[in-house]
Amino acid sequence: MVGVTPLVAAQGLAVGHAGRAVLSGIDLVLEPGRILCLLGPNGAGKTTLFRTLLGLLPPIAGTLTLGGAPLSGLSRRAVAERLAHVPQGLSTPFAWAALDLVMMGAAVRLGPLARPGRAEEARARQAMADLGIADLAGAEVTRLSGGQRQMVLIARALAQGAAAVVMDEPTASLDFANRIRVGRAIRQLADTGTGVILSTHDPDQAAALGDTALLAGQGGVLAAGPVAEVLTSERLTALYGIAVRRETLPDGALHFRG
């Protein structure tokens, strides 16, 4: 989009630990309402990239901005206002009510000693209603199914009110029906103007949800750009080290198989 400030932008970015890069040469731009899918084998640096985008790890090289502002100059609260996080899953010994967990997202804008009030509860309830899970408000998160917990985590990110969201394999370990439900929720987020960066091991999912894709492997970026241009048989074969065949279904959807 011409004249639109990117929600997330990186140029020549290198990410890693203790000064050692695991993934370099990252150029990406995320605009409002767009979904960027990050694909790559285990160990390619996808999670490290997400931790860097969230300000939890310093970049090793390159530039990184959130909403046009350099990440290095933003406070934790300012980062939270610009970027939310949906982890791969929820592991907690605490039997929080789902509504309380979602309210944690709404509360990130409060001061350190402030407590969530009616406004935060209303925002949390609205986020759950928007995703069709309002009936789970009083349920203990430890008793929810994997798909339900993932929807609660997405609602928490929605309640946070950030302009963009990063999602680390949001449908991993989910059954087919819940993968469809979560995929629809992700598309719904984008349709409301939220930018989404998600990692996935499923090229079919990337083709169905993504506007753009970035292939990460062998310490660098193999390709980045529009999904239909990036997700080729040759590139996915090189990325994963197995023969991958791309097919176009009668409805125009892309399908990949080994």
Image: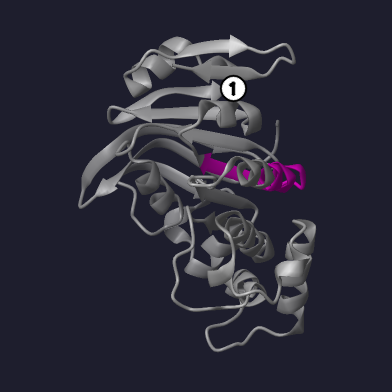
Q: Position of residue 122 (x, y in %)?
A: 78, 75
Instruction: Classify 153 as above or below 6.
Output: below
Q: Closest to the observer: 45 or 24?
A: 45
> Going 70% across and 36% down the picture, which residue do you hit?
3
Q: Is residue 191 magenta?
A: yes
The part of the chain drawn in magenta is 184-198
User: Looking at numbered disc 1 in the image, what kind of residue is underneath it?
Assistant: Pro
Which residue is tagged 1? 226
Instruction: Classify 8 as above or below 233.
Output: below
Secondary structure, mark 1, is: strand
Position of the N terminus, as image quadrant, is top right
| Figure quadrant of residue 154 | bottom right
Instruction: Classify 122 as above or below 25.
Output: below
Q: Closest to the observer: 77 or 242?
A: 242
Asked whether residue 66 is in view, the answer is no
Position of the C terminus, as image quadrant, is top left
Q: Closest to the observer: 257 or 84?
A: 257
> Going 60% across and 87% down the picture, which residue do you hit?
114
Q: Position of residue 85 (x, y in %)?
A: 53, 57
> Going 71% across and 77% down the picture, which residue do you hit?
120
Asked whether residue 217 is in view, the answer is yes
Q: Is residue 117 magenta?
A: no
Dot 1 alpha-carbon crowd within 10 angstroms: few under 14, some 14 to 19, many 20 or more = some
Q: How many numbered marks are there?
A: 1
| Figure quadrant of residue 162 | bottom right
> Going 76% across and 70% down the picture, which residue do you hit?
125
Left/right placement of residue 169 relative to residue 110 reads left
Q: Position of residue 167 (x, y in %)?
A: 53, 49
